[in-house]
Amino acid sequence: MHRRTSGKNAWMHLLLSDWSFDPFVVVAAVLVVLHELGLANLRRRSAPARTVERRRRSYAYYGGLALLVVVVSSPIDYWSARYFFVHMIEHILIMFYASLLVVVGAPWLPYLHALPVGARRKVLRGLLLGRATAPLRALGRLASAPWTATVLFCVVMVAWHVPVAFDTAETNQLVHVWLMHGSMFVAGVLFWLQIVRSYPMRPKLAPLGQIGSILVTNLVMLFLAMALSIFASRSWYPVYAAVPHVSLSPFADQQIGAGILWVCGDLWALPALISILRRLRGDGTLSALVDRAFHHDATPVPQRPQPTGPAGG
């Protein structure tokens, strides 16, 4: 009984201690207030069914924000500075799960409608037609191009695991939270926007392209995990070499982190692939499946009736 109580107390200590305040908490609170303001403005001009649908999506969005807050403020962040494998959990939560929840939550229209009508029109006119914002429009077109998100996602994931970049982020909190985590989150959002519909945006990748994007990304995770474990003979990261009160060797820690990358690659990829295949299945015919896979419209075009001449004899 004593051991069980001690174990319970140890878990409670892990869950409740080592929380920290990060400025992102203030950012998240402001984002929630603006989103609720936008939802209220939309509710006054929308049908009840649309309002209910937006409210349901908002739960996913707030879940994504809450997950980001947990990542940067909870014991996860504290222990990630001591254990590489916890840091890998942190990266996966940001790139795959928090970003997915935000995309599913589709907060774009509520944020637009959080602005007063006059300011909203001015902002839209400036963004869509202004000369000063032409570079932003070009950047937006590049970021929304079908394969850009996949390439960016893989580059960000690999680049931050280069020892120099990783150790720099570990020794500088601003780089760690705002640059490393920020770029991972943005890359994750752009990636999921090509897989999941986020009203009013639609993925530009055809379903076969979505499957290819998921497989490519999963392979990159697999190769990174292999490089950290099978093809490595020592720890890559000096920052974990002399952490006080840590008995786990840095190389063993790195191998556990590689295993987490390896296994978690399947945990997100398989459900995404199954979802795409279910969308493709449709009426079950091979021709319809091929048409949907390439974004072709499989609906037959109705034939116009041919004019007939007068019945003669």
Image (cartoon, rainbow, N blue to C red):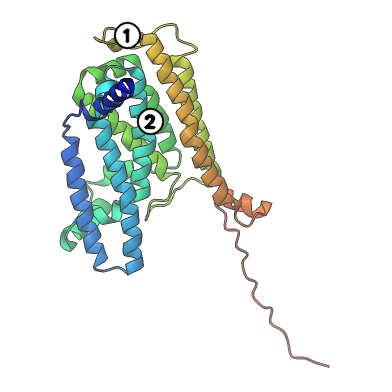
Left/right placement of residue 305 relative to residue 11 reads right
Which residue corresponds to the image point at 59% horizontal and 55% vertical from the top-left? 282
Name the spot of residue 263 as percent of width and height, x first: 48, 27
Disc number lying in front (1 or 2): 1
Q: Quadrant of residue 121?
A: bottom left
Residue 92 has which mark? 2
Which residue corresponds to the image point at 61% horizontal and 67% vertical from the top-left? 301
Residue 229 has which mark? none
Q: Quadrant of residue 90?
A: top left
Q: Is residue 229 above or below residue 12?
A: above
Name the spot of residue 208 as percent of width and height, x first: 56, 43
Q: Is residue 186 above or below residue 204?
A: above
Q: Residues within 10 Å of mark 2 (few under 14, many from 20)?
A: many
Q: Which residue is mark 1?
A: 247
Which residue corresponds to the image point at 41% horizontal and 42% vertical from the top-left? 192
Q: CA distance from mark 1 to mark 2?
A: 25 Å
Name the amino acid, label 2.
Ile
Quadrant placement of the C terminus: bottom right
Q: Secondary structure at mark 1?
A: loop
Quadrant placement of the N terminus: top left
Q: Residue furthest front?
A: 1
Count of numbered badges drawn on the protein: 2
Answer whether residue 178 is visible to the viewer in this image: no
Q: Is residue 34 above or below residue 41?
A: above
Name the amino acid, label 1.
Ser
- Judge by depth and name the residue closer to the eye, 195 or 270: 270
- Judge by depth and name the residue closer to the eye, 139 or 100: 100
Which residue corresponds to the image point at 60% horizontal and 62% vertical from the top-left? 299
Q: Residue furthest bottom?
A: 313
Q: Residues within 10 Å of mark 1 (few under 14, many from 20)?
A: few
Name the spot of residue 127 as percent of width and height, x first: 25, 51
Query: Which of the two discs, 1 and 2, labels the residue nearer the N terminus?
Result: 2
